[in-house]
Image (cartoon, rainbow, N blue to C red):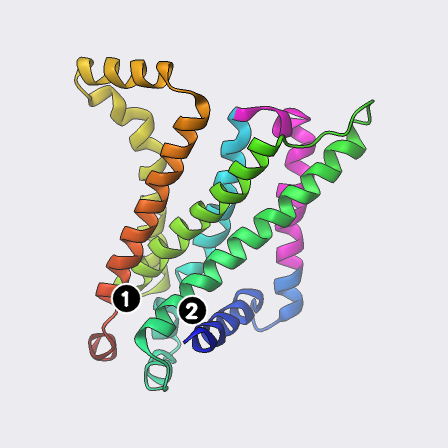
Amino acid sequence: MIGDVLTVAWKEWREFLLIRGSYRAGAISLLLILGVFGVFLPLQFGPDLIQSPILLIYWAWMPVMLVISLIADAFAGERERHTLETLLASRLSDRAILLGKVVAGISYGWGVAMVGVALAIVTENIAHRGDRFIIFSPGQAAVIVVGTLLTAALAATGGVLASLRAATVRQAQQFLMLGTMALIFVPAFGSRLLPAPWRHAIADFVGRTSITTVVVILLAILLGVDLLLLALASARFQRHRLILD
């Protein structure tokens, strides 16, 4: 089972790096991404990117943006290239195919994000030389490692689900774009639609609760959403239906 999952994941990793039929173009694209997230933006933000707890959101969103640009191709792209039938006709089980694509998306987004974090630390310390080494606190580092892993999983599971339902890659990308916009705007503006007593209760709870507890609750909610999306994708993935589609 694990070997089959890794086989599918390895196939997806190769396709992530294969842009317009060229691994060189894929490598250049990856280097540009790392240059933007690991060098250019850290220079723009300055040390606050590492020292400010608020800017931890920056690192949480990094794998989301990386994964959604690729994961829409997971099944919709196979359908467009007429390779889906060949994949589904293989000896690989449904679970191995689904998990392989999810694992590929998670590992790509999380791995590139971790490299970007390391580059940002190097960039900040070169650009802002001082008496001390600029680095994340242990708590911040733990949140970044776990948070980026969970947000990468969010993008991967949601992307696979969208790709399963979409007829084309463009349609899957549109689904994912709408989902991403909902994640941004619903928390920002949806809270205003809550009854005033609810808003006061939430504000009171956050005010009385330590930041560590709030972060743990948010990460637990994110894990729950990831598992829910994976369960929905698993229920949607039915080999005979995909072949007929």
Q: Position of residue 160 (x, y in %)?
A: 35, 61
Nearer the camera: disc 2 or disc 1 = 2
Locate residue 158, reporting x and y percent.
34, 53
- On the image, numbered disc 2 is attached to which residue? 100
The front one of 150 and 90 is 150
Magenta segment: 28-53
Report the front residue among 159 and 205: 205
Q: Position of residue 58 (x, y in %)?
A: 53, 35
- Is 169 located above or below residue 93 in the figure? above
Question: With 126 as the anchor, is 237 left or right in this view?
Answer: left
Residue at the image position 54 percent from the left and 43 percent from the top: 145
Residue found 37% across the figure and 86% down from its top: 90
Q: Is residue 232 above or below residue 122?
A: below
Name above or below for residue 31 compared with residue 74: above
Residue to which mark 1 is pinned = 167
133 or 8: which is nearer to us? 133
